[in-house]
Amino acid sequence: MRYLTDRKRAVGLGAAKSGVHHFWAMKVQSVALLILIPFFVFTFGPMLGQPYEEVTAYFARPFPAIVAGLTIVVGFKHFADGCQVLVEDYVHGLAQKVTIILVTCLSYGAMATGLFAIARLAL
């Protein structure tokens, strides 16, 4: 290994050996949201202001429930990853670790709440 150049050792790894994975995960989530958000708007929008019975009947169908669930999952995962990058850039020390944990817990808690609400409507 000592005969490898610095560039050869670093190809594909990045400085922290995980940045490329995080970058691609954010890009894939962005493209997924680019597709999911219009579907969500066009499936969820007509139900705004409707009576509870119509909304439950609408979300009992698989397509609206799946679109809403996927949008919630991908959206909050993208939120957590984006906030992690933001915190890593601007907060340092113990506060950084605590803030990342809190933001991640907030994101997954909101994701679970949204999925529970969709499940209650759909079932």
Image (spheres, grey):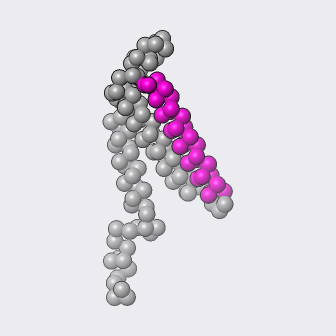
Q: Tell me which residue sits at (42%, 34%) in the image.
A: 69
Residue 18 vertical position relative to residue 58 in the rendered view, above or below: below
Count of labels in the image: 0
Q: Tell me which residue sits at (43%, 25%) in the image.
A: 122
Task: Say if residue 49 shows up in the picture.
Answer: no
Residue 67 vertical position relative to residue 4 in the rendered view, above or below: above
Q: Is residue 19 left or right of residue 39?
A: right
Q: Quadrant of the C terminus?
A: top left
Majority secondary structure of magenta residues: helix
User: Looking at the image, which is closer to me, 53 or 67?
Assistant: 53
Q: Quadrant of the N terminus?
A: bottom left
Outermost residue, right direction? 94
Percent position of residue 96, x then y: 62, 57
Residue 119 vertical position relative to residue 84 in the rendered view, above or below: above
Percent position of residue 44, x then y: 41, 23
Looking at the rendering, the stretch of residues picked out in magenta corresponds to 95-123
Outermost residue, front direction? 123
Q: Tell me which residue sits at (45%, 36%) in the image.
A: 72
Task: Say if residue 5 shows up in the picture.
Answer: yes
Q: Is residue 90 left or right of residue 32?
A: right
Q: Is 72 part of what is drawn in magenta?
A: no
Percent position of residue 82, x then y: 49, 48
Q: Is 111 part of what is drawn in magenta?
A: yes
Q: Tell me which residue sits at (46%, 23%) in the image.
A: 121
Quadrant in the rendering for residue 64: top left
Q: Is residue 43 left or right of residue 116?
A: left
